[in-house]
Amino acid sequence: MEGIIKEPRLYPFSLQFSQTENSGVARFPFIVDNKILEGPSCLISARQAGDMSFKPGEQNAARIALFHSLGLDEGTVFACPQIHSRNLYVVRRGAANSGPEADGMVCAETGIFLAVTVADCLPVYLADTRTGSFALLHSGWKGTGIADRALALMSSTWGTRPEDVAAVLGPCIGAASYRVNEERAAAFGAEFGEGPLGPAAGKRDAGWYIDLKAANARILADAGVRDIAWCENDTFTDNNLGSFRREGPDFTRMLAVIGYF
């Protein structure tokens, strides 16, 4: 594709959690050409805020407390039952705020907030600086590739151009912590190769690994996204964050949110 930039501007950052009466959250902006974007912003809840599990039709006191601490009406927050897929859909005002089974949503309206849960998987936040549309994605190893589909859906719906999109790769399990078997690493590496953050998979002395942030950075860069901020925190080693691999069956699902705060 003409105009593709395979070496985007990269902005590493670390999370800073602020404590409120009900929760701890970390906020972080989109960065475009080394400047904070005036548009949608991103946040993620701390493990101490509680488990943010979402089940349609059921109330979760931790989620409601978080929304209230942020001054949000829960009716304005849209979520979907996540299935580790590359499925996503368009959110429009007036729709039910519990969507179909999917792992991502795209929107172009202020006053609407998108939310996904993560615990080792990668939250991907996208913002179109030209049209004002935005997206939030849940990208685990099975769903890696959803970022490409989100860009395509934003393009067909609002005319989004990748060169106008800023991206944030939130906290997830780091490559040094994400050990997998050789077969999974080989398949993941064959599909996503190497990009601006390094190889998507490989071998170290301790075994095989995959890198969710590296894979998504490769996808975004190949599509033509110019500005990518990425979180250096590793959910497996950071006790402020929920981690399936560290916590086991009773792991804490964190809430990732995007919108015009």
Image (cartoon, rainbow, N blue to C red):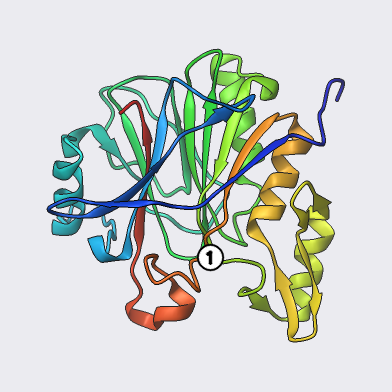
Q: Quadrant of residue 97?
A: top left
Q: Residue at x 16, y 35 (%)?
A: 71
Tell me where residue 70 appears, x and y as whole percent.
Answer: 20, 39
Task: Give the vertical position of 138 relative to 203 (above or below).
Answer: above
Residue 55 vertical placement versus 177 (above, below): above
* Residue drawn at (57%, 56%) of the image: 232
Q: Position of residue 110 (x, y in %)?
A: 33, 20
Is residue 161 left or right of 78 when viewed as pictured? right
Q: Secondary structure at mark 1?
A: loop
Q: Is residue 80 shown to the viewer in this render?
A: no
Q: Position of residue 76 (x, y in %)?
A: 23, 32
- 179 sits left or right of 19 in the view: right
Q: Which residue position is annotated with label 1?
A: 234
One can see residue 97 in this view: yes
Residue 16 picture location, percent across and down: 39, 51
Q: Say which quarter of the image contains residue 11.
A: top right
Residue most extreme to the bottom: 206
**Label 1, residues with CA under 10 Å away: few <14, some 14-19, many ≥20:** many
Depicted 10 relative to depicted 175: above or below: above
Say which residue appears at 80% left-offset and 56% top-offset: 191
